[in-house]
Amino acid sequence: MSIPQTGGGPIESKAQLAEYLAAGCKPKDQWRIGTEHEKFGYCRDTLNPLPYDGPRSIRAVLEGLRDRYGWAPVLEAGHIIGLEKDGANVSLEPGGQLELSGAPLENIHQTCDEVNQHLREVRSVAEGIGVEFIGLGAAPIWSHEQMPVMPKGRYKLMTDYMDRVGTMGKTMMYRTCTVQVNLDFGSEADMVQKLRVALALQPVATALFANSPFLDGKPNGHKSWRARVWRDLDAARTGMLPFVFEDGFGFEAWVEYALDVPMYFVYRDGKYIDALGQSFRDFMRGELPALPGQMPTLSDWADHLTTIFPEARLKKFIEMRGADGGPWRRLCALPALWVGLCYDQSALDAAWDLAKGWDAETRDGLRLAASVDALGGAYGGVKLYDIAREVVAIAESGLKARACPGAGGLLPDETHFLNALKETLETGQTPADELLARYHGDWQGDLSRIYADYSY
């Protein structure tokens, strides 16, 4: 989850808010790829989640990465809560999920190298202290009460608020993991097309990467429980955003939407000030109850944008947010999918042609179907498996057109990063299907075996 923003002068007009988003427009040769992925840590002998403190802990992992690999610490109230190096950062989700937010890089060869290097570093530190990490969309066995709480003021505020606005917010915070990719846009029109494709086809990513069929030690009836959680978290800040598909959508329309999303906090002098449920519009008038008489800065606006959680999110780039966390070999497939769809105009046009005839009901229906049945889901005559085949084929064509070589020229492009998804389509088995088959098969209902078989 995002770290506090810094810098930015006072906001003097609403126009600045749209200008802030528009500042993300870049020429195509400056488009970059930013990946994010989260994973659960646990003690090897007890299989319990890692506490924040102690010899086998989140803090010990962060300090090990700092001391052994030269990461710079990020502190909050004297606690190490993250790391920074070379444009990347390592941060903590509320329940101790360890997240890599990668540097903006030029191609998927580089992003995959970055992910692999990070995982090697984490594994080397973890092995020395009796710790393991596992990539899943939801914690399979641990109860909410077992999850640790990270020492971050933002998370305390959010935890206190979640039960007021939905039933699954705390489950999202403490017991889910995702993999995401952040992509650039060239203009307002380019942003609009990419965001529409991102939202409409996010259920396809949810289906292909479905990897959370267990909760509380047993099957939960969904292939992606993480996606189910997001459907009942907080309607004011989640969902498929029908207004994005309306005529006239652009930066200003996103600003109007974001201004109506209730606030969480204002960050001042290293502290999170409770602004739960308050209005950024009031803040713009100097009437925020949390800080009466004070006016917001652009960094406050940037912070507020990080508290909006739709299936795809606009900041100075677009975040693809629909996929479950997963095994090492699939982490590079998610950026490959979306880069293939979005960074070649012919592929982007073809992707939009697939989805442009769907109405809001169909998009929402596919979102629900993906969480329950993954590639077996369908709505309104649209079958997710069939759409996924077309989407992956379009992404492959987009990556071929990009023709970004790797491995010193031995690889002509980035298409091989889609192999895990092509295998899923060939077998019809998502990661969740594989896990369920193991649970009902050789594991004989012993879910604890997931740790030995699926950890990094």
Image (cartoon, rainbow, N blue to C red):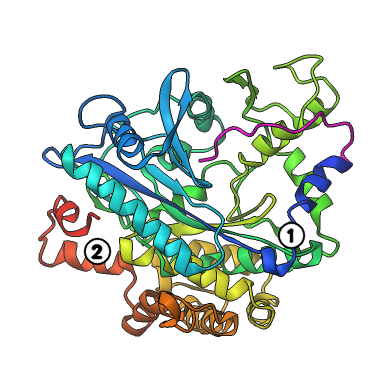
In the rendered image, residue 321, in percent from the top left (x then y), is placed at 53, 56
Q: Residue at x 70, y 17 (%)?
A: 290
| Left-right relation of 218 to 265 | left
Q: Are marks 2 and 1 in contact (CB under 8 Å)?
A: no
Q: Is residue 217 above or below residue 195?
A: above
Whether the magenta-drawn stretch holds residue 455 is answered as: no
Residue picked out by circle 1: 244
Image quadrant assignment for residue 422: bottom left
Magenta part of the chain: 1-14
Amino acid beneath label 1: Val
12 horizontally vs 394: left or right: right
Q: Position of residue 6 (x, y in %)?
A: 66, 31
Q: Quadrant of residue 429?
A: bottom left
- Residue 378: x and y, percent? 49, 74
Rendered image quadrant of residue 423: bottom left
The residue that label 2 is drawn on is 435
- Residue at 46%, 80% (x, y): give it: 415
- Residue sitting at the far top: 292
Q: Is residue 107 visible?
A: yes
> Of the residues shown, which amino acid type is indicated by label 2?
Leu
Q: CA distance from mark 2 to mark 1?
A: 36 Å
- Location of the C terminus by quadrant is bottom left
Please provide percent x and percent y for residue 409.
Answer: 45, 81
